[in-house]
Amino acid sequence: MDADVGPATERRRSTDRRLRSLLRRGLAFRLGVTAVGVGLVVVFVGLVVLLVGGASASIARFGPGFLAGTAWDVPRGIFGAWPAVAGTLITSALALLLAVPVAFGVALFASEIAPRWLRAPLAYFVDLGAAVPSVVYGFWALVVLVPFLYGSVDPSLERLSGGAAPFASGSGETNVLAAGVVLAVMIIPTIAAISREALRAVPHELREGALGIGATRWEATRMAVLGPAAPGLVGAVVLGLGRAIGETIAVAFVIGNIYQVQGSLLARGSTIPSWLVNGFNESYGLGRSSLYELAAILLVISVVVNLGARVLVRRFERGARLRPRGARAPIAAPPPREPGTPLGTPAWFARHDAARSARLRRRHGVQLLVVVLAVGAVAVAAWPLVSLIDTAAVNGGAAIVRPSFYTSAPPPSCGIGQTSCPLGGIGPEIEGTLVMVGLAAAVALPLGILGGIYLSEYARRRFSRTVGLLVDVLLGVPTILIGIFVFSVFLAYDRPDDQSAFAGAAALGVLMMPIVVRATELALRSVPTSVREGALALGFPRHRVTLRVVLGSCRSALVTGCLLAVMRAAGETAALVLTAGTSLYWITDLRAPVGALAPFIYDALMVYTNSNYETDAWGAALVLLLMMAVVSLAARLAVRAPDAQGSV
C-alpha cells in the first residue's frame, strides 16, 4: 500500500512543482511586458521633462513673447521663435499642397487602374521611395532639384507674380520654395503607399456592385471606394504632414538657413528642425535654453498633429458606420407619353436616348481624363527616385566598384589648386553604422516585441489606450528631438561621452522601439482569436500560447516590422549628428565619437566641401540606396511567405 502511494504522491508533487513554475514564469512574463509598456510612457515623459527643464531659463526670460519674437541674436541674448515656426508651417503646408494630389493619383492608379502584372512592381517602387534616407534626398535636391528650380521655375514664378509676394525676387538658389518641393518629393511615397493600402482594403464586392449597374471604373471608385477608404486617406495625409514638419536634414540642405520671417517663397529661411541641427551642438547658456524651447514647440506641434489625426480618423469612421449602406436612389419613372406621338417611338424616348448617348460620352471622357491624370501622377512621383538613382550611379558608381572603397578610411582634404585629389573609402562609416545599428537592435527589437505583446495580449483598456497613443506620438516625434533627448541624457550622466557609439546606439534604439512595438501589435491582432482559444483550451499557460502559437502564426509580419525598423535606423542622420558625433577613423573605443554612413554624407557637404569627399559621399548614398532596396525586397518576400503556426 505504501509503495503504491509513494509514486502517486511524488507525481502529484512533481505536477504541483511544474504548475508553480509555470505560474511563476507566466507572472514574470506578464510583469516583464508590463514593464516595457510602462517604460514607453517613461520615455515620453522623460522627453517632455527634459525639454521643459532645458527650456526653463528661456521661458523665465522671455515668457510667451518668445513665440512671437523674430530675432536670434546670440551676442545680445535676444531670441525668438517665430521665423523658425513660420518656416516650418509654410514649408509643410506647401509640401502638402504639392504632394497630396500626386500621391492620391499614384494610389488610385496602383489600386484601381493598373493591370495586375504592374501593381506589385509599382508598389515596390513606391515603397522604396518612402525608404530612401532623408540625407540622400537632400543631397540629390542640392545637386539636381535646386539648380532646376533656380534656373527654370523661380524666374517663371517671378514673372507671373510681377515680382510681388509670394514670389518676390529671391536671394539665391536655396530658398523656402526649394524646401517645400523637396519635402513634397519625400512625402509623396509615404502618402501614396498608405492611401494605396486604404483603397485596397475596401471589399471588392463594392466595386463589382457599382460596375454591375453600369458605372465606369472611376465612377465605381468614387461612389463605392473613396467613402469607406476615407479614414485611411486622412491618416495618410496627416502622417505625411507629420513627416514634413519633423524633417531636418533635407531641409537644412536647401532652405538657406537664414533666421528671418519669409516675405517670399523665393527667399532663404529656416525651420525648427533645421535650426536645431545646425546650432544645438555649438550653443550654450541662454542660447541653448532657447533651442530647448524651440524643440519643445516642435514636440507640441507633433503631438497636436498626431492627436488631430486620431480624432479625424475616428470621426470619418463614425460617419461611415452611421451612413446607411445599400441605399439607392429611387428609379425615376419615365415621363408620360405625349399626346399625338406614335405609340412605337414616343418623343420623350428619342430625347432620352440622345441625352443618354451624350451622358455616356461625357462619362467615358471623364474616365479617360482620370486615367491620364493618374498616369501623369505616377510619372511625376517616379521622376525624383529615377533621377536620384541615376545621379548616384553616375557620381558614385565608380567608387562602389572598387573593393578598397569598403575597407579604406575617407581621404585627406583636397587642397586649394590641387588637381589630383585622392579617393578614399567609407570603411569606418560602414563599421560605425553596423556597430550602432547592431547595439540598438540587440536592445530595441526584443523590447519592442515585448511591448507589442503587452498592447495586444495583456494591456488593460484604459492604460493600453494611453500607451498606444504615446507609441503613435513617439512614431511621429521628429528624430532631431530624439537626438536632443539622448544627447542631453548622456551629457547629464556621462559628460565626457555625450557623443559616442553608445549614445548613437541609444538614439537609434529609441527610434526603433515604437516601430517594432506597433508592427508587433498589428501582427498579433491579425491572428484569429480562435487560435488562442484553441491552445488555451488544451491547458497550456497563456505566456506559452503567446510566445509559441501566436508569435509563430505571424512570424513573417514580425520579421517585416523588424526589418523596417533596422532600415529606418541605418539611414538616420539627424539624431546621429547630435549623439554619435563625427569621426573619419576606425572604432577603437565605443565611448568616443564614431562615424556612420548617413552623417558622413551630411558632413561631406556641410563640413568638408571637397570634391573627393563629394565623390565618396555619392558612393555612400548609392550604398544606402542598395541597402534599402535589398531590405525592402526582403520585407516584401517575408510578408508573402506563409506563416506557419508555431508548436506549443
Image (cartoon, grey):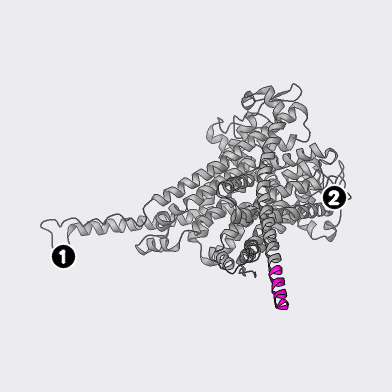
Q: Is residue 291 visible?
A: no
- Mark 1: give few (<14), some (14-19) or many (20+) Cα within 10 Å: few
Find the magenta span and give its range.
Answer: 1-14
Determine the residue located farthest toward the right in the rendered image: 588
Instruction: For the C terminus, give its image quadrant.
Output: bottom right
Q: Which mark is residue 266?
A: none
Q: Which residue is mark 2?
A: 410
Instruction: For the N terminus, give its image quadrant.
Output: bottom right
**What residue is rendered at 75% in x and 35% in y?**
280
Q: Is residue 389 left or right of residue 582?
A: left
Q: Which mark is residue 344?
A: 1
Q: Nearer the viewer, residue 484 or 187?
A: 484
Amino acid beneath label 2 = Pro
Q: Is residue 11 inside the magenta stretch?
A: yes
* Marks 1/2: CA–CA distance: 89 Å
Residue 111 in the image: x percent, y percent?
Answer: 50, 59
